[in-house]
Image (cartoon, grey):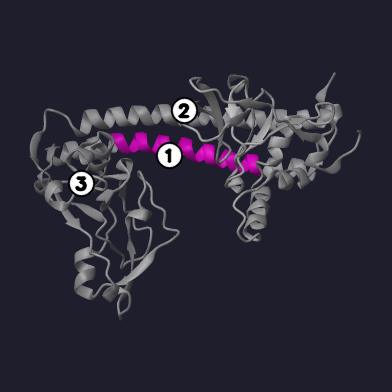
Amino acid sequence: MSEWQRVPVGKIACQRREIVRLVPGTEYRTMGVRWYSKGAYDRGVVTTDTVKAKSLYRVREGDFTFNRIDTQKGAFDVVSAELDGALATNEFPLYEVNEAELDARFLLLNFQRPDVLREISAMRAGSEGRARWKEADFEAWMIPMPPLLVQRRIIEVIDAIDDQITALDGEAEALHAVLRRRRSELVNGQGATAVRADEAFEITMGRQRAPKYATGPYMTPYVRSANVGYGKLDLSDVLKMNFDPKEREVFGLKPGDVLVSEGSASQSAVGMPVMWRGELPEPICFQKTLMRYRAIEGVSVPAFVNHWCLWAYESGAFLDVAGGTNIKHITAMRAVRMAVRLPDLADQERIAAELDTLSDVVGATRDEAHRLRSVREGILSGLLDRTIDIKSTELGD
């Protein structure tokens, strides 16, 4: 093959079924495929006591595989050497590619394109009642296929970008670990006087959501726990409730306020904090699923409040005071009794300035990784739709 072609996957990949009958008393290592291009992984050991299946399928290094459930979320991969010999259920079909015509890694790149995943999603949505993207769908999928040398050149280009992204992600994680360690040292320093949290900060619980607030003359956007992440906000879906002028005064947000998730069924979300920086125009309020931490003039400064809340989340201090069994709640009563080591205002400013600088470096590194992911997406699309041309002769000898 000397030119680009468009071929169905089934023409150059064949499903491989190496059936393994499960024997009672024997342990079997299994494999799955994660969403969002996170790839194949070890799912752990199973026995006939822990799985209903009578048989599974042997995985081999180099197999192309995907997750039939929620395929549109990017659950594709080429099996690594580490997973060779593991077993998979029929939810993870296994394919051998014709290596004389196709590099499995090039096939994987085709299924990492956002436009392809959107097409798969649209196709699934258009098939009422179908819960899985099946083998027939995969085999019928048309892909662009250049000569093998061009495929490998494209793989090299994308691998080089991926290496840079991986390095940036690693750098960001290392810097974040330094930030957390430094935050713990500075915010919880033993030299500062310990006071109750309500002496250091103004702590207010949000207003309860209720049907009577669903309409009214003062419909106001409000932030809820679904909008709050670990140091970040997702304001793509902001709801409204009726807050009258007095309630807007009580439950309104101002730049510098810190919102803390009051409770959750997930322990990792309990106490999750984020600083409000005026992302939306006032008035904007907050729901009872959140607590608002606000600096007290002459006692505390907003940036220190933010880092204290981040420390309380990272250290597990918020989770430690949370009550409840299935759903953990901090509650305002528990929150105000927490101990805060409160430096004087000048030291708070100094501590916050150092931690803000570190935070900015972490953020800039993550932003660069995010930017590079966007660049990768554009380059990959350009290479596969041939708006960016790579000739096999560029590969050298």
Between 8 and 55, the one lying in front of the other is 55
Q: Where is residue 174 in the image (x, y as percent from the top left)?
A: 41, 26
* Residue 194, above or below 324: above
Check disc 1 and report its element: helix, strand or loop: helix
Magenta: main secondary structure: helix
**Alpha-carbon distance for marks 2 and 3?**
38 Å
Q: Residue 363 carries which label?
A: 1
Residue 171, disc? 2
Residue at x 29%, y 56% (from the top left corner): 255
Amino acid beneath label 3: Gly
Quarter occupied by the N terminus: top right
Task: Name which residue lies at 65% across and 28% down.
Answer: 160
Q: Report helix, strand or loop for mark 2.
A: helix
Range drawn in magenta? 354-377
Q: Mark 3 points at which residue?
A: 324
Q: Do the residues labelled 1 and 3 touch (CB within 8 Å)?
A: no
Q: Is residue 352 visible?
A: yes
Q: Which mark is residue 250?
A: none
Q: Who comes first in sequence, dot 1 or dot 3? A: 3
User: How far is disc 1 from disc 3 in space, using C-alphas?
Assistant: 34 Å
